[in-house]
Image (cartoon, grey):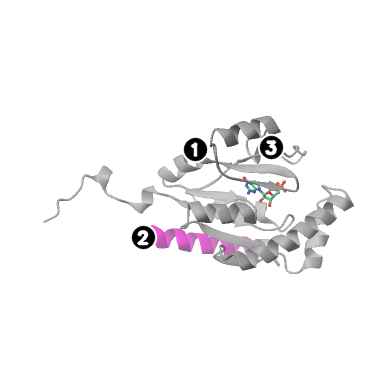
Amino acid sequence: MAQRQPPNHTPDHRHLGMLLVISGPSGVGKTTITRALEEHIPQAIFSVSATTRPKTDADREGLDYHFINDAQFDAMIAQGEFLEHAGVFGKRYGTPKAWVHQRLAEGRLVILEIDVQGAINIHKAHPSAMSIFILPPDEQTLLARLRQRKREDESTIQRRFGQARREMEIAHSCGVYNAFLVNRDLQATVVQAVALVKAEWNRRNP
Ligand code: 5GP
């Protein structure tokens, strides 16, 4: 008869955490959704990426991103410090590997707000990751929301809009996303996202 293992050695998925990827075009509301998930799910924690893009007034160092230069980014790649990294709009973004692995080992629900390339790479390394893509109701609404943010000039907005259209096409065809949520109303989408993620967390942690 098999002996019962001591508690520390018992395989227990509650101690392996869960990776949650949230993607979607700029201006679709994914940051609000991500932050709401962190607020409503006690085990959830947001992973702060490193980026070479310039800090804007809206960004908080260490909370939204770690702002680093190209040489620092190269050094982090060389040291194998990224779980994934990608180029977005000519700037580089990467997910810190050691930090994410530590949080997963503690049994946390780690939220990665990353683009489609990143989601595809995470899916390869962590096939059990849950991935959600946030869609705008339609393209014109997305364009209007990008303009409303008043963060960028019109040429940058147009570039982000073109990128968003390509990103939505790849998201649909890549087979990585478990769910697509259409953000018609931000509060309703937050409620939907929280319910979806809680259900998956509870399914894995009965
Ligand atoms: P923003 O500059 O608007 O904050 O982000 C631009 C894009 O980069 C967004 O789609 C965002 O989700 C993505 N992004 C942010 N951090 C990471 C990361 O660590 N890895 C990847 N692959 N994409 C990221």
Element class at badge 2: loop
**SS assignment for the magenta stretch, majority:** helix
For residue 158, side relative to residue 196 (left or right): right
Q: Which mark is residue 206?
A: 2
Q: Residue furthest front?
A: 78
Q: Are marks 3 and 1 in contact (CB under 8 Å)?
A: no
Element class at badge 1: helix
Q: Which mark is residue 98?
A: 1
Quarter of the image with the N terminus is bottom left
Residue flagged by tag 2: what amino acid is it?
Pro
Residue flagged by tag 1: what amino acid is it?
Ala
Q: Residue at x 64, y 34 (%)?
A: 74
Measured in 3D between alpha carbons, the distance from the residue under mark 2 to the one under mark 3, in whole angstroms, is 36 Å
Task: Give whichever of discs 2 and 3 has the lower sequence position.
Answer: 3
Measured in 3D between alpha carbons, the distance from the residue under mark 1 to the one under mark 2, in whole angstroms, is 27 Å
Q: Is mark 2 within 8 Å of ligand 1?
A: no
Expressed as whole percent of the image width and height from the top left, the position of residue 25 reads 71, 57
Highlighted magenta segment, given as a residue range: 187-206
Local packing at callout 3 (Cα closer than 10 Å; few below 14, some 14-19, many 20+) is few
Q: Residue at x 76, y 37 (%)?
A: 54
Expressed as whole percent of the image width and height from the top left, the position of residue 175 reads 57, 66
Q: Which mark is residue 60?
A: 3
